[in-house]
Image: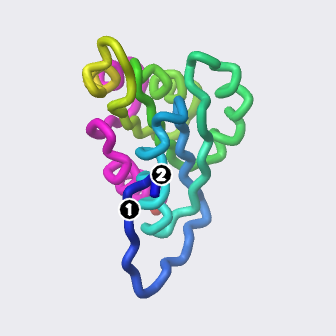
Amino acid sequence: MVARTIWIMQNKPELTKSHIVIVSAGTADLPVVEEAYETAVFLGNRVEKILDVGIAGIHRLFDKLEEIRTARVIIVVAGMEGALASVVAGLVDKPVIAVPTSVGYGANLNGISALLSMLNSCTTLSVVNIDNGFGAASQASRINKL
């Protein structure tokens, strides 16, 4: 199971009318994306995933921008230098929660470079800890249910 999660519930919650969009930079970020997805659905949210739209091929992000803008809150999952979170936050008028991942090579430092990049963003966004899909989804759920 990619998300490394398990559900134990007796009653399935009613899904929200508004929804969360999870955007990922690359396919290597999928375990964190799936953890966020499973958590958000478990908490009663409608969730859409938009995968592999990192800035190395930014045209893929622009192709999905209108779909991303329909969300009440957006989770952006990115490793490497973590730039996708700032780009998305600069293009939308919704809350953005950035999740740095430990994916990368060279000077990535197991996600530290993505974390620092997200923390130093000049756009308005929130940042959770490295690989914390659960924390991002929990925060997004609270925002989505306001």
Mark 2 residue type:
Glu
Rendered location of residue 33, percent (x, y): 47, 46
Residue at x 33% of width, y 31% of height: 102
Mark 2 and mark 1: span between their CA atoms?
A: 9 Å
Q: Residue at label 1?
A: 5
Magenta-drawn segment: 117-144
| Secondary structure under the numbered disc 2 in the rendered image | helix
Residue at x 39% of width, y 58% of height: 142
Q: Are marks 2 and 1 in contact (CB under 8 Å)?
A: yes
- Assess whether residue 129 is covered by the magenta stretch: yes
| Secondary structure under the numbered disc 1 in the rendered image | loop
Rendered location of residue 67, percent (x, y): 69, 42
Indicate the quadrant where residue 39 lies: bottom left
Side of 123 where 70 appears, left or right: right
Q: Earlier in the sequence, mark 2 or mark 1?
A: 1
Crowding at mark 1 (Cα within 10 Å: few <14, some 14-19, many 20+):
few
Rendered location of residue 134, percent (x, y): 34, 53
The mark found on residue 102 in the picture is none
